[in-house]
């Protein structure tokens, strides 16, 4: 089954996820969708110092939005902020230093952010990693899981009350089409069993993000949730975590701005909000979360189990003061 899934997915990727796939899809885009004045709207973007996150921040800043860049490295964050402020001619860009693999710090950050900011219109869960060895954080969490799944879960859960205060609040999660090769596995969230494979751990985390988005959409009707695949974009993550894929594909990869297009569209366009909450998008269209005949569908019970497990782990990593 994994040979079938990987082959079908790669052929699909060559057709759709590349730069030429983007250019073909972009012919159907309505340019006016992104013609939006974002003055007075507030956006929080994780992993905003490079790649798709930075490109998203820049596009939103150009339209007048207030941007909160959530990054783990101060120097890289300041460099990105300077570029965004300069290029967008928008001073409303703020830095927050946070490592998304550290659950206690995420809870604390979200608490402080809510106290300091009266509102948040849009949360963009973009930070992500693919660590190719099984590494544990200081909290004894597997690092891919801690960053991609648990970090996204905690930040979103903790900011829901603030988002709910706004009309037209949105949460956009940058997942990946790579999740199509994985069936949700709720019995081994931190890859303790079998031989560890970083690509498959990442794909499992990205599948978890898709299920989380569907579940949040059901639980929080006042917020529009979506997740998406940016296509294959030439970014630091691809260069460092998938060097041989990058070497083979580098001439066919999208730019970070092309990868960010659907993130921006989901975050700001009225067209996006007309779609039901909880869907998975690619190039401004909702697409299936399963490949044909891939046997990746799960039961409602398994999805509920994922959410219960995340709630339990997240609660266990709450600081005493929160
Ligand atoms: N590029 C693609 O083809 C592609 C395809 C599918 C999905 N995606 C997704 O797109 C998102 C953005 O990735 P990218 O391709 O734009 O790569 P990127 O340029 O390397 O950006 C990843 C961002 O996430 C940040 N990050 C990673 N771990 C973090 C942590 N523990 N705490 C805080 N920030 C952390 C990175 O910070 P540092 O700079 O400090 O490392 C960086 O800002 C990811 O979720 C990725 O999975 C990308």
Image (spheres, rainbow, N blue to C red):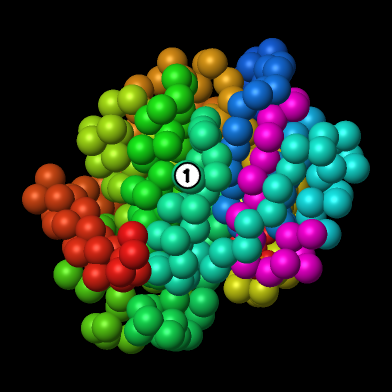
Q: Quadrant of residue 56?
A: top right
How far from the left and from the top, in percent, is residue 89? 88, 34
Front-most of residues 37 and 186: 37
As drawn, the residue found furthest toward the left would be 301
Asked if residue 109 lies left or right of residue 1, the reply is: right
Badge 1, how many Cα within 10 Å: few under 14, some, many 20+?
A: some
| Residue 9 visible somewhere in the drawing | no
Residue 64 drawn in magenta: yes
Q: Is residue 24 left or right of residue 169?
A: right
**189 above or below 275?**
below
Q: Is residue 40 magenta?
A: no
Residue depicted at 55% across the width and 58% down the height: 127
The residue under label 1 is: 114
Q: Nearer the viewer, residue 70 or 119?
A: 119
Q: Which quadrant would the C terminus be assigned to in this image? A: bottom left
| Image-quadrant location for residue 99 | bottom right
The answer to whether residue 307 is visible is yes
Q: Nearer the viewer, residue 51 or 136?
A: 136
In which quadrant of the rendered image does the N terminus lie? bottom left
Q: Nearer the viewer, residue 282 or 188?
A: 188
Name the residue located 68 percent from the left edge and 69 percent from the top edge. Answer: 73
Residue 247 position, x and y percent, is 72, 69
Which range is magenta? 63-78
Query: Residue 150 location, x and y as percent?
Result: 36, 63
Q: Residue at x 63, y 57 (%)?
A: 96
Q: Does 240 appear above or below 255?
A: below
């Amino acid at each position: 089954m994994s040979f079938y899934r990987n082959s079908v997915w790669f052929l699909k990727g060559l057709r759709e996820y590349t730069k030429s796939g983007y250019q073909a899809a972009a012919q159907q885009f309505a340019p006016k969708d992104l013609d939006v004045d974002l003055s007075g709207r507030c956006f929080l973007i994780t992993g905003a110092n490079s790649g798709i996150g930075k490109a998203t921040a820049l596009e939103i800043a150009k339209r007048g939005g207030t941007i909160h860049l959530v990054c783990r490295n101060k120097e890289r964050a300041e460099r990105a902020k300077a570029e965004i402020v300069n290029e967008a001619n928008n001073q409303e860009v703020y830095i927050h230093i946070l490592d998304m693999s550290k659950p206690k710090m995420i809870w604390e950050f979200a608490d402080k952010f809510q106290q300091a900011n009266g509102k948040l219109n849009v949360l963009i869960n973009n930070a992500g990693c693919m660590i190719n060895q099984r590494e544990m954080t200081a909290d004894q969490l597997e690092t891919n899981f801690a960053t991609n799944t648990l970090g996204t879960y905690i930040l979103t859960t903790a900011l829901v009350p603030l988002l709910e205060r706004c009309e037209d609040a949105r949460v956009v999660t940058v997942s990946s089409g790579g999740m199509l090769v994985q069936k949700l596995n709720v019995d081994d969230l931190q890859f303790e069993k079998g031989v560890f494979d970083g690509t498959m751990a990442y794909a499992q985390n990205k599948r978890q993000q898709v299920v989380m988005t569907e579940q949040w959409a059901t639980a929080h009707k006042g917020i529009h949730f979506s997740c998406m695949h940016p296509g294959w974009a030439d970014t630091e993550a691809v260069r460092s975590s998938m060097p041989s894929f990058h070497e083979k594909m580098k001439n066919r990869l999208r730019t970070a701005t092309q990868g960010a297009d659907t993130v921006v569209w989901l975050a700001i366009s009225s067209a996006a909000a007309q779609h039901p909450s909880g869907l998975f998008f690619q190039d401004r269209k909702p697409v299936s979360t399963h490949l044909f005949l891939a046997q990746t569908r799960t039961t409602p019970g398994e999805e509920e189990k994922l959410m219960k497990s995340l709630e339990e782990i997240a609660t266990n990593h709450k600081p005493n003061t929160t």
